[in-house]
Amino acid sequence: MIDSELQAEFQIAVDSNDVLLFMKGTPQFPQCGFSSTVVQILQHLGVPFRSVDVLQNEEVRNGIKEFSNWPTIPQLYVKGEFIGGCDIVREMFESGELKTYIADKGIEIAG
């Protein structure tokens, strides 16, 4: 079970970043194809985002799954709301829903 301190850290991170991606690796060097896909989508849209490399800490890697009640990584949060993993983000991107959603949340999109 996720401890309350880590739970609080996740909540602060999610609440204090407009777009936050928990991923394997970094945007410059993704360590899995799914993380790479979400990074590419966000970069294509011109969405500024912060990332957390879950491979740096096993507690974070397992804890974020419990925090979100979502079994896989990457995990995308926008304005404190959990959006989903790679498949959901890809589907939203392809339909145009992701760009609209992000814009509706008041986040500047460069692209």
Image (spheres, helix red, strand yellow):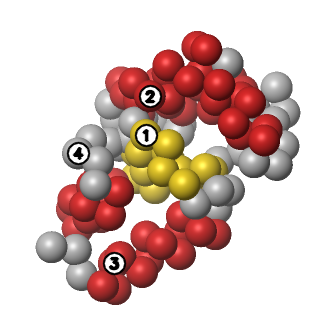
Q: Quadrant of residue 25?
A: top left
- Compared with 18, 74 (above or below) is above
Q: Is mark 1 on a helix, strand or loop?
A: strand
Q: Estimate how packed mark 1 is, as few (under 14), some (14 to 19) or many (20 or more) residues with alpha carbons within 10 Å.
A: some
Residue 100 is left or right of residue 89, and the answer is: right
Can see residue 89?
yes
Name the spot of residue 82 as percent of width and height, x first. 48, 50
N-term-proximal mark, 3 vs 4: 3
- Compared with 26, 46 (above or below) is above
N-term-proximal mark, 2 vs 3: 3
**How many numbered marks are there?**
4
- Whether residues under marks 1 and 2 lie with C-beta atoms below 8 angstroms apart, the answer is yes
Give the residue displayed 42% in from the left and 80% down from the top.
8
Query: Label 4 belongs to which residue?
Result: 71
Give amino acid for label 4.
Answer: Pro
Give amino acid for label 2.
Answer: Ile
Query: Label 1 belongs to which residue?
Result: 84
Query: Label 3 belongs to which residue?
Result: 6
Separation of residues labelled 1 and 4 (CA atoms): 10 Å
- Whether residues under marks 3 and 4 lie with C-beta atoms below 8 angstroms apart, the answer is no
